[in-house]
Image (spheres, rainbow, N blue to C red):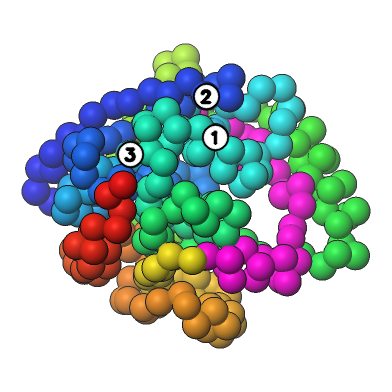
Amino acid sequence: MPLLPSPRELQFDVNGMRFSAQEWGSPGQFPVLALHGWLDNSASFFALAPQLQNLHIVAVDLAGHGRSEHRPGQMAYTPWDDINDLLAIADQLGWKRFAFLGHSRGAIISTLTAGAFPDRILCLGLVEGLLPEPGLPEDAPTQLAKAINGLRSQQQKSPSIYPDMAVAIKARERGMFPLGYEAAKALTERGVVAQGSGFSWSTDPRLLAPSILRLSREQLAAFVNNIRVPVKLLLATEGLPRLYTNYLQQVANFPHINYELLEGGHHLHMEQEVDLVAQKLNEFFAEFIASETWIK
């Protein structure tokens, strides 16, 4: 892989926490908040962001991930708190309106934000993610109990220690969605902390606890149906459509969601398919930027 331009490091103090981020592009260009997936970090965009044109990209390490702080006490991690953080970060950047570039859980958070705050969002570029798994109303008590028990259980676990960076990278290559070396290296280098003579993940283990609440299918549909801006969703043949057999049918229920199925895996924006992903997103953002409706 050719040498890629290094992003600039940013920090934000919002909602009583410190968040780290990486920045590509310059103020005055089209504003984009980039959101990584579950247990990843802002290095998720190391290969894609340098290829995206005319964008001011701020890729945030979400709470409990990468170099951002963990939520205090025994707080659970919810997309609702993430949305509150991201709006505060956008305020600090002076962005009244902005776009999202989201992968996986980051794409889900982007969708929910656009549904709840449609007047603040310009457009959505999504990779392998749209909505979380729905829940049944009658399952809510059990779900809450699982979540709280999970939080208590994670508090008592000891972190895995890797003797050196190479072993940690190898472990990340073999994750739930396997990664190539370069992608695993980028995520690992930003996602570990020194632990004695070795390394452990910086990710808050509470992120492994079940969700506190799962919204119903109808509630989730209300968020998508309240989105009033263009959406480009890129899915991978070996990603979510393979993991969930009815995924494409569910996406097709929302005709205003422009989706495309590409060859590749769940992290195709970090792997050999990144050039095609960049091409698709450049075409999407360029059309919107050219309209100049975002300059206000």
Q: Which mark is residue 14?
A: 2
> Percent x, y for residue 56?
25, 43
Q: Is residue 99 left or right of residue 14?
A: left
Name the N-terminal-most of marks 3 and 2.
2
Which three-letter amino acid code belongs to the residue tagged 1? Asp
Circles 2, 1 touching at the beta carbon (< 8 Å): yes
Circles 3, 2 touching at the beta carbon (< 8 Å): no
Which three-letter amino acid code belongs to the residue tagged 3? Val
Local packing at callout 3 (Cα closer than 10 Å; few below 14, some 14-19, many 20+) is: many
Residue 216 higher or lower than 104, as above or below: below
Which three-letter amino acid code belongs to the residue tagged 2? Val
Name the image quarter holding residue 194. top left
Q: Is 209 inside the magenta-drawn segment?
A: yes
**Residue, x 33% and y 71% (percent of image)?**
264
Q: Secondary structure at mark 3?
A: strand
Residue 160 or 272: which is nearer the viewer?
A: 272
Q: Is 5 inside the magenta-drawn segment?
A: no
**Residue, x 40% and y 47% (percent of image)?**
97
Q: CA distance from mark 1 to mark 3?
A: 14 Å
Residue on which the image places disc 1: 85
Q: Secondary structure at mark 2?
A: strand
Question: Which residues are the magenta region?
Answer: 200-227
Local packing at callout 2 (Cα closer than 10 Å; few below 14, some 14-19, many 20+) is: some
Name the N-terminal-most of marks 1 and 3.
3
Residue on which the image places disc 3: 58
